[in-house]
Image (spheres, rainbow, N blue to C red):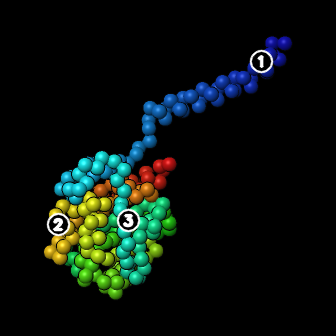
């Protein structure tokens, strides 16, 4: 009889054990939350990088809508990056200082995510009058840029300047995108699937490129 009672109690013991394991796991997860990247809004960034009209914004910042043209003459908009993670920067094809190294590092990111449809790259020309579509096309071919992964874009200077100052918060230069205004920055900006800024990096530093790889892996784990 005792042996029979013990056999009947086995399922109950198993259920109790299972709930104990689940309880311990849940408690552990509560005590050790998943690492998560910050979400940047204007108040989280150096005020000199932010257009004065946005200094008061504390949350819910997203990259503004835009319409530019890439190296193949194709229109690039926010819709191009729907549900995508992307890295953005600002460059110009005639730059002989920081841009070549930045392009080399963007090329490394292109190769790292070559077969990953969730990750894209976006480089804005800061001299759009000089960087026409044919110029960007030649530059892309010389640098091994793949259009399906990496968009080099040109368009109205005012729009590009506004994106730098009002969306990405990437440059210290003041101005309104006029003829004499000029953007020059080493910043790489990480944008998530919801068009939110999740990280800033020095695009000339190889160690920062490794950090981008790590941070993109974190973004992919977010639900």
Q: Position of residue 155 (x, y in %)?
A: 31, 77
- 131 to 53, vertically: above or below: below
Pick whichever, 96 or 195, lies toward us.
195
Which residue does the numbered mark 1 point to in the structure image? 6
Q: Earlier in the sequence, mark 1 or mark 2?
A: 1
Residue 65: mark: 3
Pick whichever, 11 or 99, lies toward us.
99
Q: Earlier in the sequence, mark 3 or mark 1?
A: 1
Which residue does the numbered mark 2 point to in the structure image? 175
Q: Which quadrant would residue 94 be assigned to in this image? A: bottom left
Pick whichever, 79 or 133, lies toward us.
79
Q: Mark 1 or mark 2: which is in front? A: 2
Is residue 94 among the parts visible in the rendering?
yes
Residue situated furthest right in the rendering = 1
For the residue labelled by badge 3, is the local secondary structure a helix, a strand or a loop? loop
Q: Is the residue under label 2 in contact with that under label 1 (CB below 8 Å)?
A: no
* Horizontal side of residue 136 vs 78, given as left or right: left
Q: Is the residue under label 1 in contact with that under label 3 (CB below 8 Å)?
A: no
Q: Is the residue under label 2 in contact with that under label 3 (CB below 8 Å)?
A: no
Residue pictured at 25% horizontal, 68% vertical = 161
> Circle 1: is it few (<14), some (14-19), or many (20+) Cα within 10 Å?
few
Residue pictured at 43% horizontal, 51% vertical = 218
Q: Earlier in the sequence, mark 3 or mark 2?
A: 3
> Circle 3: is it few (<14), some (14-19), or many (20+) Cα within 10 Å?
few
Residue pictured at 27% horizontal, 60% vertical = 166
Q: Which quadrant would residue 151 be assigned to in this image? A: bottom left
For the residue labelled by badge 1, is the local secondary structure a helix, a strand or a loop? helix
* Horizontal side of residue 49 vs 67, given as left or right: left
Q: Could you tell me how far apart the alpha carbons at marks 3 and 1 are, in whole angstroms? A: 68 Å
Name the quarter where the N terminus is drawn.
top right
């Amino acid at each position: 009889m005792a042996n029979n009672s013990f056999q009947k109690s086995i399922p109950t013991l198993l259920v109790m054990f299972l709930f104990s394991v689940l309880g311990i796991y849940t408690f552990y997860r509560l005590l050790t939350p998943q690492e998560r990247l910050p979400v940047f809004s204007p108040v989280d960034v150096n005020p000199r990088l932010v257009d004065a009209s946005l200094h008061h914004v504390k949350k819910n910042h997203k990259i503004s809508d835009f319409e530019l043209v890439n190296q193949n003459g194709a229109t690039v908009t926010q819709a191009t990056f729907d549900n995508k993670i992307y890295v953005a920067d600002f460059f110009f094809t005639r730059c002989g200082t920081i841009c070549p190294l930045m392009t080399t590092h963007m090329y490394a990111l292109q190769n790292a995510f070559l077969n990953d449809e969730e990750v894209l790259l976006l480089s804005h020309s800061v001299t759009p009058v000089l960087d026409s579509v044919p110029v960007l096309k030649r530059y892309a071919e010389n640098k091994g840029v793949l259009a399906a992964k990496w968009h080099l874009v040109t368009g109205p200077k005012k729009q590009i300047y506004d994106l730098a100052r009002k969306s990405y918060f990437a440059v210290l230069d003041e101005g309104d995108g006029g003829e004499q205004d000029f953007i020059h920055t080493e910043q790489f900006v990480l944008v998530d699937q919801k068009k939110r800024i999740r990280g800033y990096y020095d695009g000339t530093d190889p160690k920062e490129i490794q950090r981008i790889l790590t941070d993109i892996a974190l973004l992919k784990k977010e639900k």
